[in-house]
Amino acid sequence: MIPPELSPLSTPLPVSHPALWRRNVNVLWIASFIAMIGMNACLPFLPLYVRALGVTDFAEAQKWTGLVYAGAFMLSIFTVPLWGALGDKYGRKLMIVRAIFGLTLAMFLMGFAQNVWQLFFLRVFQGGVSGFIAAAISLVSTSAPEHKRGWAISVIQTAISGGTVIGPLIGGAIADAFGVRSLFTMVAGFCFVSGIVVVLYVRETPETKTAKDAPSLSNTLRFAWNEPLLRGLLWTIVLVQAALNFTPSILAYFIEEKGAPPQFLATTTGVAVGLVGVLIVIFAPRWGRLTDRRGFVWVMLRVLPWLGLATMLQAAIPHYEWIFPLRVVIGIFAGAATPTLYTALSKHVPSERNGGIMGLASSATLIGGLLAPILCGWLTAQWGMEWGFVASGLLFLAALPMIAAMRKHLSR
């Protein structure tokens, strides 16, 4: 039960109120949940939209799908760290608002794409104005007490995952009933509502107060590169995010190949994606508390082997129903991957650099997201879709020695 004074829609708290950080977590949970419902309502079905835009050859559709997925990451790799540094100077709430309304415009325009090239360039534009989640995590992590940061970041992760659950289920039903193109207007509407929630109810705490003399982006880059722990965490984020993003672009095709009924293909794909999200919502806060108590190395060394094994076993399923128990295992452990690494970063950087470092973390996330679908499209076109799942699992396992090597850089 949320206390009345912390209810997201209650009378605004003064910026000096000690519980304001919890209020912001609640509000940003709602805003992130709404935005992620919108984004994930269409994201799993981009392969079907590529086909609807005239790319009917299967190998070409796989390659174009990889490019369309990667398009959102191509520009954002460079812009998200810049937005993070600007957030340190001018306000993290401002960056959240800018990102969510930019996403609203991008999604609205995608609904009017006439060919796959237009869809690709709109995805690039979407990436250029992105940074909503990074700004939200930065605001939450700088205002929450250190012993609560893992929990707070994990709570935001549950909103992301909750949207991942509900979005594909709604999107799949709409796509099957009305076509994929109709999804994008709905997505824009969800994102617009999310932006209004942030404008009205998020308030920056004294701990997140910005300064005009905050470190520049170039200074933050040098700082991160010269700190072995931060450098290792950023490289690990690249690897883990590449593993997480390697197969979503082919999941609909894979489920179709494994015998899913064509008339329910989008719905079945939505359930497969949403199942992982349900488990992340349930388990992410638990992983967050474990991270606060035991440290990120302890958590990641136990999570990565299970993610690697369950991901690779998807390649061996004989029929599409077999993918669902493996998705359950992935969902249980995926709730630890991203928030644990972000928590580790937030606990080892000064607060005045938090926005810039979180921007670099988002850039690392985006690099993984950029490379993964392109490599997956090439690999699966050459060798078959099963190899996409094998490669994804191996990437999870490859992060294990990187995590183990970070022990010596920890003060605890």
Image (cartoon, rainbow, N blue to C red):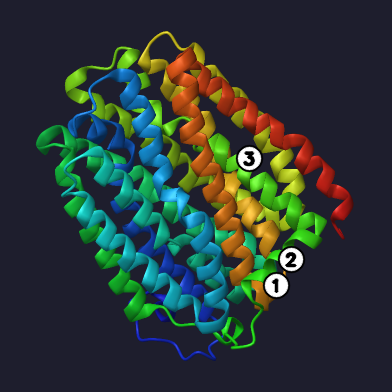
Residue marked by disc 1: 219
Q: In the rendered view, tell whether residue 84 sits above or below residue 385.
A: below
Q: Earlier in the sequence, mark 3 or mark 2?
A: 2
- Residue located 44% across and 82% down the image: 203
Give the percent coordinates (x, y) of residue 220: 68, 69
In this view, the residue in front, 282 or 130, is: 130
Label of residue 222 in the image: 2
In this view, the residue in front, 84 or 74, is: 74
The N terminus - image quarter? bottom left
Q: Earlier in the sequence, mark 1 or mark 3?
A: 1
Q: Residue furthest top?
A: 318
SS for callout 3: helix
**Are the two marked residues, 3 and 2, in contact with CB atoms closer than 8 angstroms?**
no
Q: CA distance from mark 3 to mark 2?
A: 21 Å
**Quarter of the image holding residue 308?**
top right
Residue marked by disc 3: 239
SS for callout 2: helix
Q: Is residue 3 visible?
A: no
**Are the two marked residues, 2 and 1, in contact with CB atoms closer than 8 angstroms?**
yes
